Image (tube, grey):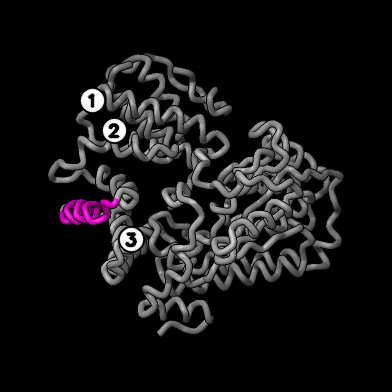
Amino acid sequence: MAEPAARGGRVVGKVERAPFANWHEAVERIGRHLTDRQPLRALETSARAIRQFPHNPELLRRHAQVAEQLVADEPDHAAGYADIALRCYRRATRTDPGNPDAAAGYARMLDRSGDRAAAMAALGPHVGREPPHPEIAMVFATLAPSQGLTERAIGMLDRVLAERETIRLRHAQARLLDRAGRYEDAFAAARRGNELVAISQKANGFRPGVLTATVDAIIAATPAAAMAAAAPIDRRSELPVFIVGMGRSGTTLVEQIIAGHPQAHGAGERRAVLRATTAIARLAGRKYPSGIPHWPAEALERVHDEFVAQLQRLAPGALRIADKLPQNFMRLAVLQRLLPGARIIHTRRNPLDVCLSAYFQEQKIPAMEPWDLYRSGLCYRDYERLMTHFRAVLELPMLDVQYEELVARPEAEARRIIDFLGLPWDQSCLAVERNRRIVDTSNYESVRRPIHGEAVDRWRRYERHLEPLRRGLAGLPPE
């Protein structure tokens, strides 16, 4: 097996080379690396353990599991890590066919790679077992609606939840009940899942109002006069495209349209702008965000060159590379100073649908406080406040894309997007369901479908529960 570090293009720290006393020791060490938030180290350790114990199904499964995590953590190398995960889950299922965790992981990666039929086949031997295994039930919940098996999946989750309750299981149940049209039950499940999220966030020391304080600081640091007076850099690249907005506003669909173009590449939710911001602040000796207008051109140019070089290595020959991390809306002032040739696509959607959709997803961005409908509305106001400020003080080219318009008139809007990028139109941009690249999104199953408008005005199904959200969006005090 090739060294994971080489596959990922990354160099990790020194790893112990002495043989493991047994495979249990290797599993323990892998777990310790993960606890220490060192997934690359964990992957290299698990690869070494597999070389020593090549047929151990648990080590194969752990190696695949870490690689799967890195698909999200390292989007620049997602395809390589997805390949590792897929191969090792497959080996684990062949070595130990009765292992439900390995089967669930294999099916999940097959589905994320665009092979839903193979994913269903991988789950098949485990679906009828009682009691249902939690991970089998979770993956089946993702696959079932496209197979007409939603009610069966709901039953499986109900039986699992009778024995144990987790955030992931409750949110999966909520989404399935929504698909089945059982809206009151769906909202009750989502509400319970978010109660569990709130408990977890409180235990982790989260304090409300993080986004408000961040937006206040960014606005104070970037007045129009200061941004206009900031020294420009002697660099310009049209390669980068940033798709920004609130999560659940259509950023993934826009990226899929761009990624379908033969001269463009979809790079996923990169953390590159965050890393670049940290690097500039260190080189300049001026913190973010207060230092943004004062960063010297030399520091910006040095980071700019490395940033663009990384993009070029990602997709040699591509004329445009899209980064769809939604939260980059907070860093547009950084992008103006660092990448003056960049284009920004700003996705918008009815805020009631945005916040409700986030409420139904288990993947949460804490600063947006999506587990609390009232505070989610307040956070949406902060996002709008910052975007209004940036429109007044920045000169980056920006295209607004309204989700509802995009799904109602896909070709017209897709043509507008591609024209904004300065590329010739290509009909393949509309065939988003044929794009088989690995996509990291909390609702990745929807990415494999043709463009549709089923989620437009979804909020109407839950209108009687949304008064707290309406009050937050209006800036009114809670009831």
Amino acid identity at mark 2: Ala
The residue drawn where x is 51% and y is 36% is 78
- Whether the residues at callouts 3 and 2 have beta carbons within 8 Å, the answer is no
205 vs 459: above or below: above
User: Judging from the image, what secondary structure is the residue with disc 1 in?
Assistant: loop
Residue 426, how many percent across, how many down? 66, 45
Image quadrant of residue 303? top right
Secondary structure, magenta segment, majority class: helix
Q: Can you tell which mark lies on residue 102? A: 2
The residue drawn where x is 31% and y is 69% is 183
- Whether the residues at callouts 3 and 1 have beta carbons within 8 Å, the answer is no
The residue drawn where x is 60% and y is 44% is 428
User: Which residue position holds label 1?
Assistant: 96
Whole-angstrom CA distance, mark 3 to mark 1, is 34 Å
Q: Which residues are magenta?
A: 148-162
Residue sitting nearer the eye, 360 or 410: 410
Amino acid identity at mark 1: Asp
The residue drawn where x is 28% and y is 72% is 184
Q: Can you tell which mark lies on residue 196? A: none
